[in-house]
């Protein structure tokens, strides 16, 4: 990749200019500001260079590192009056608050010492030597952490269900099967801070009495897999994973399982089936995995973002975490901000931040000075949010009240040129393609919605078709087995609600 080439060139330049012994060139995880990548940060000044090319390496070393003069043309903030443009001066970062992404862009994710230097594994140490399982659950309860995979279920409760079941074998699972179009929060966390996931899973193992964990991750994420593997190896070498962790007598190890790219395997019961080597299909609940999960054993399954919060809660305390966010939703949320936005990237904001702040203050507004039309949150399961709701403080409850959902964190911005019917069709086709076909409402209902939308966009629709879309959608919500089928109609129904005139524009026969 271009970043790899830049990395190599910087090393070569340091050698060529005789400073290889004094300068460290370090790879790090995602800075979040994707729009401006590849990014190079030079320390100790913290100068933030953007859109760097491999050819720029020579100038960065000779001008900045050797002569102490910033290469102004590559600075993000070229107008800055200060000598060095720093991250905290960049508007994209100013309203962000990083808990999950705390180490991304700061540490070398392939070096465990750098994670440890930033309070890494302190939460595990506490869990092993200072806290009982009940106390850990209490800390999570005080924190108010809710699952970040989409459903928002209280994390402490899930852990407690598993903890209370008597069984010699229990499991801990990380859901890294991120599949929403446009979402890459979990990939970046695994690439930029893999130890945070390992530490959290081990803490959970101690809490519920499990000795084995699995990370289920998409095979399409090779760098994340590579970094997780390195992190597991280093953690074992440091006695932080494996037998008798830190001399505590507690054993816990983790294995990676690769997913083959089926979106439905992000649904927890389908994911567990897939780990068991079966076809990934959702199962009826109850029983819930916390009680009867992997191979019938109690299993705590959380997604990457949820896990990444856990070590910080143990280190800083549940009360600290509880003060961040809203009454309904504590902590932060990571969003993958994409679409027609100036600053696309990965953003982490306290719950309660408004959509307007994310889109305009962090995202820099709509690209090419176009007009904002809508934003889709919750990926193919969510809905569109229009301008009148831009000041809604984001949390689990508020997004549902305005007809969308938090989902796992995809946020796609649309401008005045986007056809809402096309967007709804895109999401619908995605969900229909990814349906596992197990139950009729989803299998047949989704296909029927597609056929009607095709008819409408081909100019052959009637007004009655809009009612039929709504009726089928309602039946799918009520009758589908899992969230995929239950939420498949959402993008269509919410876009009809907010942009009926665009559907009508496709309908010639208005009788
Ligand atoms: Fe499969 Fe769809 Fe039924 Fe879920 S709702 S089990 S994805 S057919």
Image: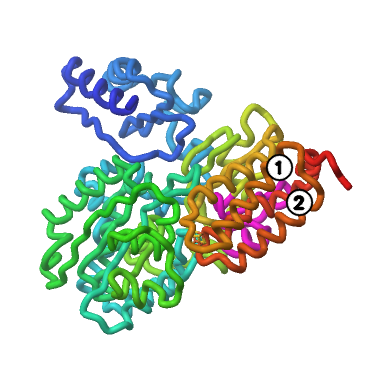
Image height of 429 relative to 3, above or below: below
Residue 204, percent from left and from top: 29, 69
Residue 313, percent from left and from top: 37, 65
Mark 1–mark 2 distance (CA, rounded to whole Å):
9 Å
Residue 451, percent from left and from top: 65, 47
Q: Is residue 202 left or right of residue 479?
A: left
Image height of 291 relative to 272, above or below: below
Residue 81, percent from left and from top: 50, 26
Q: Earlier in the sequence, mark 1 or mark 2?
A: 1
Asked if labels 2 and 1 touch by Cβ distance under 8 angstroms, the answer is yes
Q: Report the span colored magenta.
A: 377-405
Image height of 313 relative to 370, above or below: below
Image height of 50 relative to 413, above or below: above
Q: Mark 1 near ligand 1 (CB under 8 Å)?
A: no
Residue closer to the observer: 107 or 81: 107
Q: Is residue 77 left or right of residue 402?
A: left
The structure residue drawn at horizontal position 46% and vertical position 36%, both measured from the top left corner, is: 33
Q: Which residue is mark 2?
A: 465
391 in the magenta segment:
yes
Report whether residue 352 is seen.
no
Q: Which residue is mark 1?
A: 455
Residue closer to the observer: 72 or 454: 454
Residue farthest toward the right in the current orientation of the protein: 511
Q: How many marks?
A: 2
Residue closer to the observer: 401 or 283: 283
The structure residue drawn at horizontal position 34% and vertical position 69%, both measured from the top left corner, is: 300
């Amino acid at each position: 990749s271009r970043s790899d080439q830049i990395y190599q060139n910087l090393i070569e330049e340091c050698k060529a200019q005789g400073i290889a012994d004094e300068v460290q060139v370090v790879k790090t995880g995602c800075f979040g500001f994707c729009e401006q990548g590849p990014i190079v940060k030079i320390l100790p000044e913290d100068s933030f260079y953007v859109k760097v090319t491999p050819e720029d390496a020579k100038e960065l070393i000779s001008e900045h590192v050797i002569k102490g003069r910033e290469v102004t043309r590559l600075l993000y903030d070229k107008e800055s009056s200060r000598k060095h443009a720093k991250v905290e001066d960049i508007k994209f970062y100013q309203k962000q608050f990083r808990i999950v992404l705390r180490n991304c862009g700061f540490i070398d994710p392939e070096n465990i010492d750098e994670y440890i230097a930033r309070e890494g594994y302190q939460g595990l140490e506490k869990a092993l030597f200072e806290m009982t399982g009940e106390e850990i659950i209490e800390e999570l309860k005080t924190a108010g952490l809710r699952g970040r995979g989409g459903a928002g279920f209280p994390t402490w409760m899930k852990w407690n269900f598993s903890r209370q079941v008597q069984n010699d074998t229990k499991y801990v699972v990380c859901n890294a099967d991120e599949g929403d179009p446009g979402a890459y929060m979990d990939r970046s966390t695994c690439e930029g801070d893999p130890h945070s996931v390992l530490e959290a899973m081990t803490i959970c193992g101690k809490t519920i009495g499990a000795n084995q964990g699995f990370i289920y991750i998409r095979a399409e994420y090779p760098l994340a897999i590579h970094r997780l593997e390195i992190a597991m190896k280093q953690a074992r070498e440091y006695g932080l994973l494996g037998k008798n962790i830190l001399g505590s007598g507690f054993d816990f190890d983790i294995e990676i399982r690769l997913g083959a790219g089926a979106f439905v395997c992000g649904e927890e019961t389908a994911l567990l089936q897939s780990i068991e080597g079966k076809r990934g299909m959702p199962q009826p609940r109850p029983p819930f995995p916390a009680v009867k999960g992997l191979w019938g054993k109690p299993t705590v399954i959380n997604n990457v973002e949820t896990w990444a919060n856990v070590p910080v809660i143990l280190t800083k305390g549940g009360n600290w975490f509880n003060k961040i966010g809203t009454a309904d939703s504590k902590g932060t949320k990571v969003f993958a901000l994409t679409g027609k936005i100036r600053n696309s990237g990965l953003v982490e904001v306290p719950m309660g931040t408004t959509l307007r702040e994310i889109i305009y203050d962090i995202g820099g507004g709509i690209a090419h000075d176009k007009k904002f039309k809508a934003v889709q949150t919750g990926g193919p399961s969510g809905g569109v949010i229009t301008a009148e709701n831009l000041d809604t403080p984001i949390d689990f409850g508020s997004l549902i009240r305005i007809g969308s959902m938090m989902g796992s964190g995809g946020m796609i911005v649309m401008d005045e040129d986007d056809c809402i019917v096309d967007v709804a069709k895109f999401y619908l086709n995605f969900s229909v393609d990814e349906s596992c076909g197990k139950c009729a409402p989803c299998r047949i209902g989704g296909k029927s919605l597609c056929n009607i939308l095709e008819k409408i966009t081909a100019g052959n629709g009637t007004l009655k078709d809009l009612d039929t879309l709504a009726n089928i959608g309602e039946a799918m919500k009520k009758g589908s087995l899992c969230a995929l089928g239950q939420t498949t109609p959402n993008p269509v129904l919410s876009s009809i609600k907010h942009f009926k005139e665009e559907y009508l524009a496709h309908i010639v026969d208005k009788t």
